[in-house]
Amino acid sequence: MPGEIQLRQTLARPYLPAAQTPQVAYVLIEIIPTQVTANVQMPVNVAFVLDRSGSMRGNKLRAMQHAVGLALDRLNDNDTVSITIFNHETAVLVPTTPASERRRIMRLVDGIKDEGGTKISRAMYAGLTELARVPRGGLSRLVLLTDGETDKDEADCLALADQAGTNGVPITAFGVGNEWNDKLLTGIAQRSGGEVEHLVRPEEIEDNFQQVVHQAQSAVFQNTSATVRLVGGVTPRAAWQVVPLIKNLGYKPLADRAVVVPLEQLEKDTRRVLLLELMVEPRAAGQYRIGQIEVTYDIPLLNIHDEKEKADLVLTITTDQALTQQLNPQVMNIVEKVTAFKLQTRALDDIEAGNIAGATQKLQGAVTRLLNSGETELAQTVQREASNLQQQGQLTSEGAKTIRFGARKTVRLSDLDLPK
């Protein structure tokens, strides 16, 4: 039945001038789950794949053990869990087991000892094998945690991530500290359809493990996509997700002047926010319907399939210069943060290609954007790293990870200044 989600659109500039040249229009799209799905919860199958190498000793290991306990408390009794631990060898500590056995599971987790090196691929294989033992019907997640570099098996890790993606198993990869391979973990997450997170402090493991479980239980909207249909003279330039993380979604041409933006799974209690960047050809003054956005989704637990929610995209063009000066400050703030994100990610690409001067320039441009949008702390980090890059030809390990992963989190729902 319709009504499971609402769509809301907000233009960065409510009025565009009647110009003689093409101009860019930014449209913020909010996909808002309604109370219809409030009591729906997905059954969850979680495989924890946990580093127990010697470098995990002390606070890291204790935080990891406590985090597993908190995650188990969030799981329902009919959910399932497995735990694989690894150093240079792999052991399935807890085969696929109902979460109702949490006390027995925690006794085993509390007995984990740190020792040895790091070999990730065999542990990933074991975790995916455990997930495959669970009958279909639930939502599967693999949680990978490490604080170090793997031992010469990167290609195997990426191949397993491809397999996980094909089987619909997103991998959430957590890197603790600054010594892990961010390129590898990013590849694992992207290829599987999951996410990667940089955990600066061991204490962050606890909240993040709980968050993975909560997100899985809340992901009641499946096979979700947005189709944007535009009229002649309006073309798409980019489609960004800005909440919960900034991400270039890309799009696939569907037909003439129509594109599909993949959204995959939506959570019942979290708004998804998109930013569409459109190029508008010159038009006379007036109000125009320039297109339509249609969100398609399934809710298997409610036996809802291929349901659709639509909203028109409307634009006003005027010759009144006073009106054309009006800006929506919340949307413009988000545009600034997306621009800063683009500059930072392109700077990292430039560094990898050896273009230090170009990377430095982009980082300095990102600093200006971050300051303009109120992200003072991240701006200070980026400025320090731009200076390091200019003087020493490289970023610090910590700074590079902060830029790569912190830049994605600058847009918050509070930026929209909308009632809850």
Image (cartoon, rainbow, N blue to C red):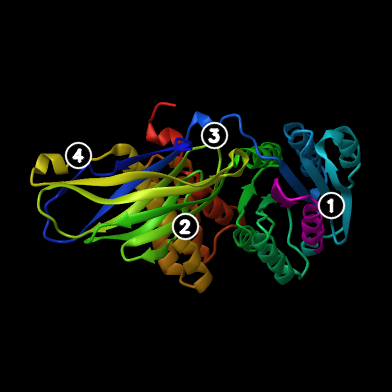
Which residue is disc 3 drawn over? 269
Q: CA distance from mark 3 to mark 1?
A: 32 Å
Amino acid at the residue labelled 3: Asp
- The reply to whether callout 2 and callout 3 are in contact (CB within 8 Å) is no
Residue at the outermost left position = 319
Q: Residues within 10 Å of mark 1 (few under 14, many from 20)?
A: many
Region of the chain picked out in magenta, as a range? 122-146
In the depicted structure, whether residue 276 falls above or below residue 2: below
Q: Are marks 1 and 2 in contact (CB under 8 Å)?
A: no
Q: CA distance from mark 1 to mark 4?
A: 56 Å
- Which of the marked residues, 1 or 2, is nearer the chain's N terminus? 1
Residue at screen point 19% across, 39% down: 326
Q: Which residue was labeled with disc 4?
A: 326
* Between discs 2 and 3, the one toward the N terminus: 3
Near mark 3 (Cα within 10 A), the count class, few <14, some 14-19 or many ≥20, is some
Give the Cα distance between marks 2 and 3: 41 Å
The residue beneath circle 2 is 387
- State which mark lies toward you, 3 or 1: 3
